[in-house]
Amino acid sequence: KFVIGQLKGASASWWNHLHFRHHSKPNVLDKDPDVNMSGLFVLGAVQPVEYGIKKIKHMPYNHQHQYFFLLAPPLLIPVVFNLQILRTMISRRDWVDLAWYMSFYLRFFYCYIPFYGFLGSVALIIFVRFLESHWFVWVTQMNHLPMEIDHERRQEWLTTQLQATCNIEQSFFNDWFSGHLNFQIEHHL
């Protein structure tokens, strides 16, 4: 809780819950939170057809390839994750996680307000989260979205892991940029 709360500004309970769900059923609609895009995007070959049949149209999905870059990378961590984290900690009354989460921001502002002032410090944390969000989207999505996204097929765990993840070519840059998450199959196993 200390590492992810105080050093990262997130919730250990929130992360573990989502990450364990993702690892147990990767790329399974309604099970994997990473492919549940809350109506902003439709993923894979199955979900767009289902949305079309049910006439669900929260967004102009035929243009999602154009607005993905405007919404997903810049807003995932600064907006979506932070709202989810706060909602989860408050609804579960996880006051320890909330205290660690708040301690990150107290420490951050305590360290940076003397140098940049309050507004400059707010701009800095937004910029840092903006960059972090771009990195996170690219690293996580390149390993999962190219693979099949479908409803549960009751396959063995190993088969599910191998069909839902892919490795990215090893290179000095890919190893460094992804923090070795380019070995996504091994990460899932």
Image (cartoon, rainbow, N blue to C red):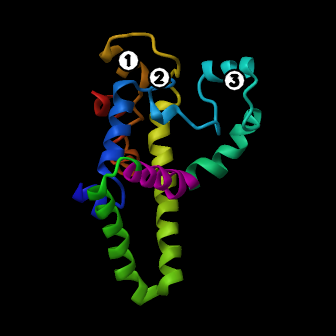
- Three-letter amino acid code at the position of disc 3: Tyr
Which label is found at residue 28?
Answer: 2
Q: Residue at x 30, y 63 (%)?
A: 99
Q: Position of residue 155 (x, y in %)?
A: 37, 10
- Quarter of the image where the C terminus is located: top left
How far is mark 2 from mark 3, CA to CA? 16 Å
- Quarter of the image where the N terminus is located: bottom left
Asked if residue 169 lies left or right of residue 60, the reply is: left
Asked if residue 121 lies left or right of residue 172, the reply is: right
How far is mark 1 from mark 3, CA to CA? 24 Å
- Three-letter amino acid code at the position of disc 2: Val
Q: Which residue is mark 1?
A: 160
The mark that comes first in sequence, 2 or 3, is 2
Taken as a whole, is the magenta stretch helix, strand or loop?
helix
Image height of 185 relative to 18, above or below:
above
The mark that comes first in sequence, 2 or 1, is 2
Q: Residues within 10 Å of mark 1 (few under 14, many from 20)?
A: some
Callout 2 touching callout 1 (CB < 8 Å): yes
- Three-letter amino acid code at the position of disc 1: Thr
User: Of helix, strand and loop, which one carries label 2?
Assistant: loop
User: Of helix, strand and loop, which one carries label 1?
Assistant: helix
Asked if residue 146 lies left or right of residue 55, the reply is: left
Residue 80 in view: yes
Q: Identify which residue, 92 or 171, lies in the foreground.
A: 92
Highlighted range, magenta:
75-90
Q: Which residue is mark 3?
A: 51
Q: Position of residue 60 (x, y in %)?
A: 76, 37
Q: Quadrant of residue 51?
A: top right
1 or 3: mark nearer the eye: 3
Q: Is residue 89 magenta?
A: yes
Q: Residue at x 67, y 23 (%)?
A: 48
Q: Position of residue 186 (x, y in %)?
A: 29, 30
